[in-house]
Image (cartoon, grey):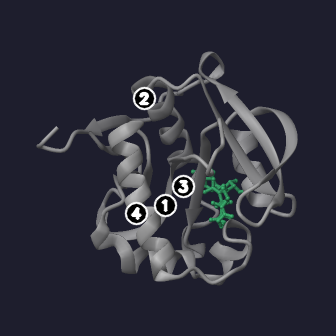
Amino acid sequence: MAPTIRTERLLLRPFEPADEETLFQLWNDADVRRFLWDDQPVSRETVREQIAQSQKDFREERFGLFLISRAEEPGTVIGAAGLFRFADADWVDLVYALRPAAWGQGLATEAARAVLRFAFEVVGLDEVLAGTDLGNVASQRVIERLGMTDEHERVVGPNKVLARYRRLRRQDFVAGPGRFTLVEPPDS
Ligand SMILES: CC(C)(COP(=O)(O)OP(=O)(O)OC[C@H]1O[C@@H](n2cnc3c(N)ncnc32)[C@H](O)[C@@H]1OP(=O)(O)O)[C@@H](O)C(=O)NCCC(=O)NCCS
């Protein structure tokens, strides 16, 4: 139902309730929450809701959110990535974040590309959108590297933030040669 994804350097594992503390720390890192959470503290309640929503999404829509670890260090979380919908949105959003110590190595692009491949080849979505706050230059570079186009602006999220968006359609996605292996959970 919710597989783990193995890429060249990474493991992407679906969020679980036991990840609450890990995600609480990740989302409240000042450099991670600056744009991703409009620089607001993230409560444990929000983390619990997010995990529950991701599990519901995996059940009902076959996509959700993943923790990211290096493949050779599966017990240490370096970030998160995945797919979600803002409340009432009629599109699916791509999201990615890494602890600052993991920046500058192409790992966010590798994780995001794997999530897109999952979205198009496994879930069968027709298109995925990705938005970044106007000042989030590093994230805009990730979106460009993924081959996303059709730049436009939209107002999103509970805080009604103006974000720069791009989209990628399934027929325009180029997976590339990198490793992409799915490990299905035993009960699926
Ligand atoms: C957005 C974010 C994930 C980008 O991280 P990042 O490290 O810049 O992105 P990547 O992991 O793809 O790494 C790309 C950089 O690594 C470099 N790099 C080094 N080795 C590389 C390799 N083997 N392959 C590819 N790129 C490599 C690239 O040149 C690039 O640097 P540049 O942008 O200066 O040219 C990070 O800033 C972050 O977590 N921010 C907080 C959360 C957030 O705002 N998320 C976005 C909202 S969706």
Q: Which of marks 2 and 3 is nearer the N terminus?
A: 3
Residue for badge 2: 123
State how far apart marks 3 and 4 are (Cα).
Answer: 23 Å
The residue at which mark 4 appears reads as 51
Task: Report whether the residue tagged 3 is closer than 8 Å to ligand 1.
Answer: yes
Q: Earlier in the sequence, mark 2 or mark 1?
A: 1
Q: Residue 57 at what x, y percent from top left? A: 41, 45
Q: Which of 184 and 64 is in front in this view?
A: 64
The amino acid at mark 1 is: Ala
Q: Mark 3: few, some, or many residues within 10 Å (few <14, many ≥20)?
A: many
Towards the viewer: 29 or 127: 127
Q: Earlier in the sequence, mark 3 or mark 4?
A: 4
Between label 1 and label 3, give the one nearer the viewer. 1
Q: Confirm or deny contact between disc 2 and disc 1 (CB under 8 A).
A: no
Q: What element carries label 2?
A: helix
Q: What is the three-letter code of the residue carrying label 2? A: Val
| Residue 55, x across and y down, in percent | 35, 53
The residue positioned 59% from the left and 21% from the top of the image is 170
Q: Which amino acid does label 3 sit on?
A: Leu
Mark 1 lies on a secondary structure that is: strand
Q: In this view, does 43 lie above or below 112?
A: below
Q: Which of marks 4 and 1 is in front?
A: 4
The amino acid marked with disc number 4 is Ile
Q: Earlier in the sequence, mark 4 or mark 1?
A: 4
Q: Quadrant of residue 112?
A: top right
* Marking on residue 80: 1
Question: Pointer 3: what residue?
Answer: 107
Q: Residue at x 59, y 24 (%)?
A: 174
Point out the quarter of the image occupied by ligand 1.
bottom right
